[in-house]
Image (cartoon, rainbow, N blue to C red):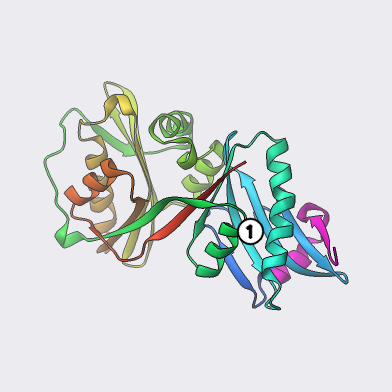
Amino acid sequence: MPFDIQACSNLPPTDLARFLNANNLSFNNLDWFPPNERFSEAGCFAVIEQQQIKALLAATPESSQIAWLRFFHAERDGKHGKYFKALFSQAKMVLQNMGIQSVFSLAPYNWLESLLKGEGFMPADTIVTLQCDFAGAKMRRANPELIIREMTQRDLAAVEAIDFAAFDPVWQLKRASLEKTYHLSAWNSIAILEKEIVGYQMSTNTFDSAHLARLAVDPRWQGKGVGHSLVEDMFETFSTIGVTSFSVNTQASNTQSLSLYHSLGFEREDRDILVMSLNL
């Protein structure tokens, strides 16, 4: 092999950061952690040629079963296919040794979809985006027995349990990711029924727009208006500071979520992103 593969944890962080900020061919997952916070994780590797970084890739676990392609950056020298193959091969061995069963990746670009297909990835789902203006939001009378309050860090253990119960393994977030989401979100809230935390939401905002980043309801309490009430509370909280536009992402296969968001006035945008997966 004409180039060397090294773990990013063994390379100077300044060199890695400089490469990330260069005008490279690049893909970044919808990730709460920036690439530089992935450098120390298993599954993060660099191509080195003549003592220069040529490409970076991270494929790291989110759970004991599932890993995600976090990012891929490559110099624009026409060799990105070779770099990807070499880097992913190294990352795949690490993940297999960790017991990871599947790797998932978004494929927002044709060139990345082609690289993933070359490694055996297959289409698994589609991420869809929905949009709602507050004026068009469909509000309804909340369950009078339901309490919505701001989330605190002490609630994260209960939030983690709800996340694990509500989502399939591929969409679950580990505790560190939930904590990161909590700290980066503008409004976090929980729903309480019969003195038990039964659902939560985390959302962000920029100027007059807000994004519902995470919403989950304990399956035992679904069908009682919990999700609807959490989103209504999010609408009302942000509207008081001038937010007028709301967005959310979900999977095309998640008919339950799509039904909920449509009932709240969200409409699907033409911005679908393919999700691909590989069984190890």
User: Residue 60: percent from the left, percent from the top?
Assistant: 64, 47
Which residue occupies the foreground of this view, 143 or 43?
43
* 201 in magenta: no
Which residue occupies the foreground of this view, 31 or 193?
31
Tell me the residue that label 1 is attached to: 35
Going by the numbered disc 1, the residue's amino acid type is Pro
Residue interval drawn in magenta: 1-19
Relative horizontal placement of residue 51, taking residue 240 as reference (left or right)? right
Which residue occupies the foreground of this view, 148 or 268?
268
- Image quadrant holding the N terminus, namely bottom right
* 17 in magenta: yes
Q: Residue furthest right?
A: 50
Vertical relation: 177 (above or below) 205: above
State the SS at label 1.
Answer: helix
The residue under the point 20% across, 35% down is: 225
Q: Residues within 10 Å of mark 1 (few under 14, many from 20)?
A: many
The residue under the point 15% across, 31% down is: 144
Residue 105 in sight from this viewpoint: yes
User: Residue 90: percent from the left, percent from the top?
Assistant: 75, 51
The residue under the point 63% across, 62% down is: 72
- Image quadrant holding the C terminus, namely top right
Vertical relation: 95 (above or below) 53: above
Vertical relation: 61 (above or below) 137: above
Residue 230 in sight from this viewpoint: no
User: Residue 245: percent from the left, percent from the top?
Assistant: 27, 63
Q: Residue furthest left?
A: 141
Q: Quadrant of residue 131?
A: bottom left
User: Residue 108: percent from the left, percent from the top?
Assistant: 47, 64
Vertical relation: 100 (above or below) 50: above
